[in-house]
Image (cartoon, rainbow, N blue to C red):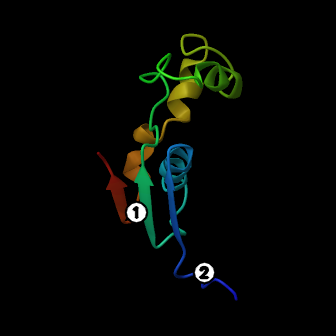
Amino acid sequence: GIADPKQLTIGGYSYGGYMTNWLITQTTRFKAAVTGAGAVEHVANWGNDDTTFDDAYFLGGLPWEAQQRYHDEAAIYQINKVRTPTHIVGG
């Protein structure tokens, strides 16, 4: 079948939640979103999990070396752009 482009939804948990959080700040394409356990800001989570150096690699350095990039890539600082109704899973 073919997906109806007017009825698309997005959702994810963990890294999928992170990607969902980011995507809903970048587009209004989705009719709804569901997100859970997804990071919205990298610096506050720095050193708390095994992706610390992955973040440094993909974001071009350590938080104190690439401050603007960390800010620009954080969904929380772009939350004013979200227009997609979103269910946030917690607990």
Q: Residue at x 56, y 43 (%)?
A: 15
Could you tell whether 85 is left or right of 16 in the image?
left
Check the picture and name the quadrant holding the C terminus. Answer: top left
Mark 1 secondary-structure assignment: loop
Q: Residue at x 47, y 42 (%)?
A: 75
Mark 2 secondary-structure assignment: loop
- Per the image, the residue denoted by label 1 is 83
Q: Quadrant of residue 32?
A: bottom left
Q: How many marks?
A: 2
Could you tell whether 7 is left or right of 37 in the image?
right
For badge 2, the amino acid type reads: Pro
Q: Is 91 located above or below residue 46 in the figure?
A: below
- Per the image, the residue denoted by label 2 is 5
For badge 1, the amino acid type reads: Arg
Q: Quadrant of residue 73?
A: top right
Q: Position of residue 1 (x, y in %)?
A: 70, 89
Q: Return the residue found at the far left.
A: 91
Q: Is 23 located above or below residue 46 in the figure?
A: below
Give how far apart the Cα atoms at labels 1 and 2 are: 17 Å
- Of the pair 68 and 88, the residue shown nearer to us: 88
Q: Position of residue 48 (x, y in %)?
A: 46, 20
- Of the pair 17 and 74, the residue shown nearer to us: 17
**Badge 1 or badge 2: first in the primary sequence:** 2
Residue 4 bears which disc, if any?
none
Q: Position of residue 4 (x, y in %)?
A: 60, 85
Crowd rating for badge 1 (residues with CA inside 10 Å; few <14, some 14–19, many 20+): some
Q: Return the residue found at the far front.
A: 91
Q: Are marks 1 and 2 in contact (CB under 8 Å)?
A: no
Q: Position of residue 38 (x, y in %)?
A: 46, 43
Q: Residue at x 60, y 11 (%)?
A: 65
Crowd rating for badge 2 (residues with CA inside 10 Å; few <14, some 14–19, many 20+): few
Q: Residue at x 52, y 48 (%)?
A: 22
